Amino acid sequence: MSGLLIDAAVQPFCRDGREIYDYMDEVNRDRGFPDVESQWYQAPGGDYDESLYGKGYPGSDPEIASRHLFEDDGVDVAILNPRTRGNLPDFQLNTAVCSASNRWLAHRWLDEGNPHGRFRGTIRVNPEDVPGSVAEIERWGDHPLMVQVGVPLQSRDLYGRPRFYPIWAAAAEAGLPICISTNGGAGLEYPPTPTGHARTYSQYIAFMAYNYVYHLLNILTEPLFKEVPGAVFVFSDGGAEQLTPFIWKLDTLWLGVRDQTPWVDRPPSEYLKDHVRLGFSRLDKPPGDSVPIVDWLAQTGKEDVVMYASNYPFWWRNHPDDLYEGTTKEQTEKVRWRNAGEVYRGVTAEAA
Amino acid sequence: MSTIEVSGSDRTRTKEVDVRWVDADVHPLPHPGDGFLGYAPDGWRDRLAPRGHEISGVSARILDQPEANKAPTGKVDSYSPRGGPACSDPQFAAQQLLVETGMDIGILLPMGRDHRNPDYEHALKTTVNNWLADIWLDQHNQHRRWRGSISVTNREPELAAREIERWAGHPMMVQVLMSPQRPAYAFGDPKLDPIYEAAARHRLPVATHLMANLPYENSIKPVGVGGHFSDYISAWGLILASHLMSLVFDGAFDRHPTLKVVFVEGGFLWVLPLMWRMDAIWEARRSELPWVKRRPSEYVRDQVYFTTQPLDDVDTREEIAFTRWLDMAANLIFATDYPHWTYDDPKWALRRLPKELHPRIQHENATELYGLPQTVPALPGA
Amino acid sequence: MQVRQPTNKGARRSAREYVVCRQEDLPPGRMVIAPVGKFGVGVYNVHGILYAINNYCPHMGGPLCSGNVYGTNLWDDVRGRAEHVLDGRIARCPWHAWEIDVATGVSVADARKRTRTYDVRVENGEVVLTR
C-alpha cells in the first residue's frame, strides 16, 4: 500500500537501569543519575503497550522490536530516539549521559541489532552544554545510520533562542534535523502545564502533546532561520491537531507586530514546509469522520509536515492502518514516507 | 461629541431598541479623576500605593504591543480628549463603542489587578469592584448599557466567595471574573469550589481573561516563555486549554453541574481538537477518572462559552470551515475587546463567522447566559 | 466607527480635482485629510514629496490616516541585520497597527493588501489632489 513506510518515532530502551553504565566514559562511570523511568507522571498501570510487557523491558530488545515493527506493522525504516534525562543540574554529567546513549545506540541497535539495516538513530545532545553538543554532533555526524539530533522537549528556555544556534548550526551542517521530544521527568523541569502540575495523569499526558506549540511559535519568531537557514525541527510527539489554530494566531499577530521581528519576512506559516515536521498518530487527528479528513489535512499545509510515528512501545502506540482512512493517495504517501524522506538522509533510498 | 446621557426624568420617555449586539469584552480603566484609591476597603487605602510605573508614566509590560511607546493601554484612536488611559472615560467609550460601533450592551471586564500578595490582590479586586459599580454601573449608566464583572482573586477562594456574595444582588453585575495567570490552582482544583458554589448559587457565570503582561504575571511556561509579543500571545490559548482540561479531568463540572465558565479572548478554534484529545484520553483511561462521568466534550458543550475575538486574519473560507467543524452554535459570544488594539470590528467579524450562527453569536447566547434584557433605551445619535 | 476628520480649508476645483490646502500648510512631516470620497484621503508630505492614500485600512476599514507615522524595520540580508528604513513613509492604522507605505498604499507585511493611492501635485502654490 502506497509504497514505503517510515516510522519517525520509536523509543528504544536499555535492558535495565544498569546497562547505560557500560557505555559511560571512565570519568563519569561511578556517578549516580536517575534512569529515564524516574518520572513522576508515570501512567497508572504502566506506560507501555500491555502486550509488550513480558520477559524484558518493553522496547529493549532489537529483535522483538524488529518483529513488531517490520514484520507485524510493515515498517520499512524505523527512527530510534532514546530518552535521555532532560536537564540534569550537572551539565557535564548530562553531556556524558548523552554520549553514553549514543555509544549504546550505535552498538546495540545500529550495529548488533541491525542485521536488516532498517534501524536509524538519533544523536542525543544536552542543549544546556552548547560546546559539548556541538562536539557530540561532530563526533557522530558522519555515522551513516545517525539521521537526526535529539533534545528534550522539557527545556529551560525555548529553542528559538540565539544561545542554541551553534547546536542547530552543527546539525544543519551535518545534514541532520533536530528532534524535540518528551524525555522522562528525570531532570530539572518546569511544571508540565502552564497552570502548574496536573492532578491527573490524563491531564498531564493530554497537555504534554501541546507543549511543542511553545517551541514552534518561538522558533518561527526568532531570527533562527536567518542565522541557520538549513535548520529543520521535528516534533515527534505529535499534536498536529493544534497546528492550524495556533499558526493562524501567529500569522495574524505578525501582521501587526512584524516590525518587532523584521527577520521574519514572510508569514510564519510559510516556513513550516521547509523547516518543520510533526510526528503523526491517531491521537492527533479528528476522530472517525467528524471532520472531512482530506480538507483538514490540507489546511495550513498539515499534509506537508506530518510523518507516521508509531510511538512504540508506549500505550498510545499506533499502527499504520490507524491513520489513512479517507485520505487521498497523495496524502497517504506524504504521511507514510515522503515528508520523512525530505528531512531524513538516506531513508528512502536504502529502504527501497 | 454629542452627550450620550439619558437624564433621569427623560428615561420614561426614551424609546427602547432591540438588543442586537452584545459585546462580551470591554476593558475599562480608572481615570485619574476617579480617585480610584478612595474605593479601597478600610485600612488598605494607604497600602495600595501607586506602583512604580504609575508614577513614571511608562508601561511596565514586558512584552510590548505595537506602538506601546505612544499608546500603552489601547488602540491609538481610543484615547479620550479628557485624558487618562484608553477606555477610562465612560462617556467617550459609550460614544465610540455604543453609538458609533453600534453595540447595544457592553460587558465590562477590568484587567490588570493581580498581585504577588494574595491579601493585597483581594484588596485590589475589592477596590476595582467598588469603583466599577460606582463610576461605570451607576454614575454613567443611565442608558443601562454597561454590565459589570465581579473581580475576585482565585488565590484566596474563601475571600473570593465572600466578594461574590457581596455583589451577587447588584442588578448590573452579571458575572465573576478571575485571572488565569499565576494560578495557585488550576481551575478544576477542588480548592476553588467555594468560588464555583457561590457563582452557581447566584447563576453567575465565571469568566477568565488575560490580566496583564507585567513581569510578575508572566508565569514560567512548561518549556520557557515566548520571546516576543507575537509568539507569547499566540500561545496564550494554551493556558486556557490547560484550565479547561483541569475543569474536566479534575471533576469540577461534575461537582458543579450548573456552573458556566466563559473563556474570554483566548481563541476558540483550539477547543475542537482539545475535545478530540480529551475524549480519546478519557476513553482510554476512564478507570482512573471515575469522577468524570460524561464524555469530556459533553461538559464543554454544556458548560463552557468562548468569545470570538480575536478572529484570525487568514483565508476567510478556511476559517469559516473550521468554525463549522467546531459546531458550537450555543457556545460562541461576540466581543470587540474595546479599546485594545486586537479589536474586532463587528462588520468585519461577521464576514468571518458562519452566517447561520450570526444571531446566536451577536446576542442570543449572551442574553441567555447573562440574563440580559431584550431591549435597551435608545441612545441619542445612534 | 466614524472617521473624525480634521478640518481643512480645501475646496473642490472640478469634478476630478480638489484643492487640499496651500503648499505652506503641508510642510514636511505633516498630513492633511482631504474630505474626498467616502472615507477621506490622507495627503502626506514625506521629506518634500507628496503622497495621497485612502483613509481606509485594507484590513478592517479603520481610519488609516488618523494613526501615527513612522519608518519601519526590514531585514537586510546583505548586512545580516535589521535596518530602520522608509522613515516618515509608513502610516500605522490606529486600530491594529498595520503598516502601510503611503508611497504605494501597500502593506509592508503582505503586499497583497493595499489601499488606494491618489495623484497629488503642487500647482500655483496649492496642493491639488486628483480623484
Image (spheres, coloured by chain):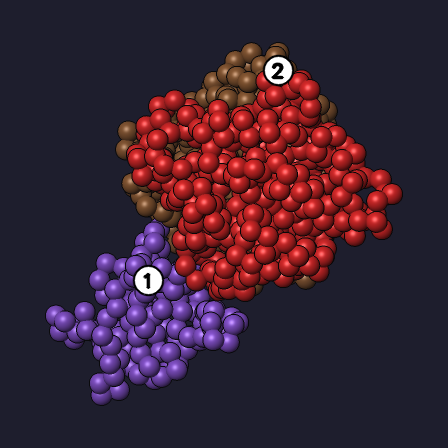
Residue reaching furthest to the front: A115
Give the labeled residue for mark 2: B289
Dots 2 and 1: beta carbons under 8 Å?
no
**Callout 1: chain:** C
Q: Residue at x 26, y 87 (%)?
A: C125
| B156 to the left or right of B212 | right
- Crowding at dot 1, Cα within 10 Å, few <14 / some 14-19 / many 20+, comes out as few
* Picture quarter with the N terminus of chain B: bottom left
Residue B120 in the image: state x and y as whole percent.
75, 40
Residue C4, which numbered label?
A: none
Q: Colour of chain C?
A: purple
Give the labeled residue for mark 1: C111
Residue reaching furthest to the left: C15
Classify B216 as above or below A173: above
Residue reaching furthest to the right: A30
Q: Nearer the viewer, residue A88 or B28?
A: A88
Classify C13 as above or below C109: below
* Picture quarter with the C terminus of chain B: top left
Q: Could you say whether the residue bearing mark 1 is in a helix, strand or loop?
A: loop
